[in-house]
Image (cartoon, rainbow, N blue to C red):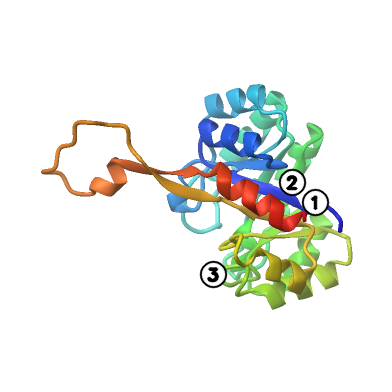
Amino acid sequence: MNKILLEVCVDSLENALIAQSAGADRVEFCANLSEGGTTPSPAQIRIARERLQISLYVLIRPRGGDFLYNERERELMQSDIRFCGETGCDGVVIGLLHPDGTVDAEHCAELVEIARAYGMGVTFHRAFDRSADLFRAMETIIGLGCERILTSGAYDTAPEGAESIRQLIEKADGRIIIMPGAGITPENAGELIRKTALTEMHGTFRSRVASKMHYRNLRLSHQQDEYSLLATDARKIKRMLKIINY
């Protein structure tokens, strides 16, 4: 069986290092995963690059919400990509759409061109799942020169979208990597592999960890949010690696 590459989505330097120590092949580095992910700070990117030996891709997304960006937001994205290139990142993760749900090829091309100038790869993220026509969007993204698409098959989870993912992989025919992500667990990974013949897989693999704070103001609400956090779980990553590369 060929090796399946495992990408772990992380939202902090600490979690990136946990993913690396657990055996991940690549990290997608984000901030604000509760909003679907945004670009992490320059300091986090720089120190992550210094301390990671595995491949580092950085999410380029100036805010949460939709994937329709104005000129000022695109300018920020261009600057962030340049910073990633100057810092020595391996790649960036982008995604821009038009109001009608088609890929914004013109402005994506500008971002891809900057990334390529620094020798970086480009992943098109799950904005793809919000596109009006997956197969038309895939052809546009292939034309842009992106190397992979992260997708759940336009469903809430990749296992639900397995048939769409299978069809995308089949139609891509090696021209681009289709990387399933969203809702993949050690319990369902094997079936997803069998159904789709995927070669790369993406996930957060997190567990809730209790805070080490002793004092807690119980008069305040949202106790779980402030006295625990979701952290990358090395055990889940190691278990997944055993399943996908048995």
Mark 3 touching mark 2, by CB under 8 A? no
Tell me which label, 3 or 2, sits earlier in the chain: 2
Can you see residue 70?
Answer: yes
The three-letter amino acid code for the residue at tag 3 is: Asp
- For marks 3 and 1, give the one nearer the viewer: 3
Q: Which mark is residue 156?
A: 3
Tell me which label, 1 or 2, sits earlier in the chain: 2
Asked if 169 appears above or below 86 in the picture, the reply is: below
SS at mark 3 in the image: loop
SS at mark 2 in the image: strand
How far is disc 3 from disc 2 in space, using C-alphas?
23 Å
Q: Residues within 10 Å of mark 1 (few under 14, many from 20)?
A: some
Q: Which residue is mark 2?
A: 122
The three-letter amino acid code for the residue at tag 2 is: Val
In the picture, which quadrant includes the N terminus? Answer: bottom right
How far is disc 1 from disc 2 in space, using C-alphas?
6 Å
Taking the image as shown, residue 35 lies to the left or right of residue 215, namely right
